Amino acid sequence: DAGVTQSPTHLIKTRGQQVTLRCSPISGHKSVSWYQQVLGQGPQFIFQYYEKEERGRGNFPDRFSARQFPNYSSELNVNALLLGDSALYLCASSSPGSNQPQHFGDGTRLSIL
Amino acid sequence: QKEVEQNSGPLSVPEGAIASLNCTYSDRGSQSFFWYRQYSGKSPELIMFIYSNGDKEDGRFTAQLNKASQYVSLLIRDSQPSDSATYLCAVRTDRGSTLGRLYFGRGTQLTVWP
């Protein structure tokens, strides 16, 4: 079975631009979470979606938004990009049930020039 | 503020030795505990999870949980150079608005030398 897939793998943007990152969960997984990982740090939680509804939001500005589609795939949008948004963006999915572990995709490495 | 602290690295052990990685967490309501391995430039890979006090073994890996001390550890027996990576401890509280959210430590970099 395919794991969590993310696209694109790498992206270069300039300050002020907007970006959309995409994620497809493992088949059968209905929950998708987004994390930001800057170099030398652990991942930081951005959003969680379950059954197309937002179930949690981390301490990120309103420039960050996300949504989940009926097929459980998800998009993360970031507007007005700043240099500090340069990071590895990780998508994780988990199967129903609060005790299920999250499995990560390969991530999207976003560089802001 | 929920905090997850990992022992400062880098940790360096010879091949065949036992590597011990430690993690403490601040929220007593934490329910689920995870260890992820992350190779340089790659994404985190789940290697162990534990929910109950005590030990859980999977091959060369043993996770230990002590909720009273708010402490979780990972032991890697017979360490191999391929185990060289950053190990991330993650905690989940499974309550209210934090349902499903993982809190990560900064990671401990492990190097296993031949």
Image (cartoon, helix red, strand yellow):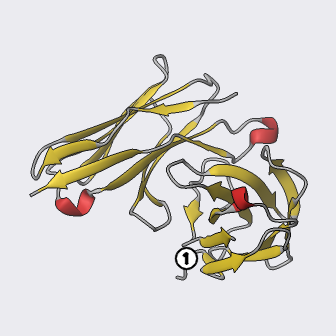
As displayed, is residue B96 above or below residue B38? above
- Picture coordinates of residue A50, whole percent (x, y): 80, 60
- Picture coordinates of residue B26, whole percent (x, y): 58, 23
Q: Is residue A94 visible?
A: no
Position of residue B106 in the picture relative to residue B99 (left or right): left
Toward which corner of the image does residue A107 lie, by quadrant?
bottom right
Q: Is residue A113 visible?
A: yes
Name the quadrant of the C terminus of chain B. bottom left
- Picture coordinates of residue A108, whole percent (x, y): 62, 73
Asked whether B10 or A97 is in front, the reply is B10
As displayed, is residue B110 above or below residue A3? above
As displayed, is residue B105 above or below residue A104? above
Toward which corner of the image does residue B30 lie, by quadrant?
top right
Asked whether B101 or A35 is in front, the reply is A35
Q: Which residue is mark 1?
A: A3
User: Which chain is home to disc 1?
Assistant: A
Position of residue A49 in the picture relative to residue B88 (left or right): right
Amino acid carrying label 1: it is Gly
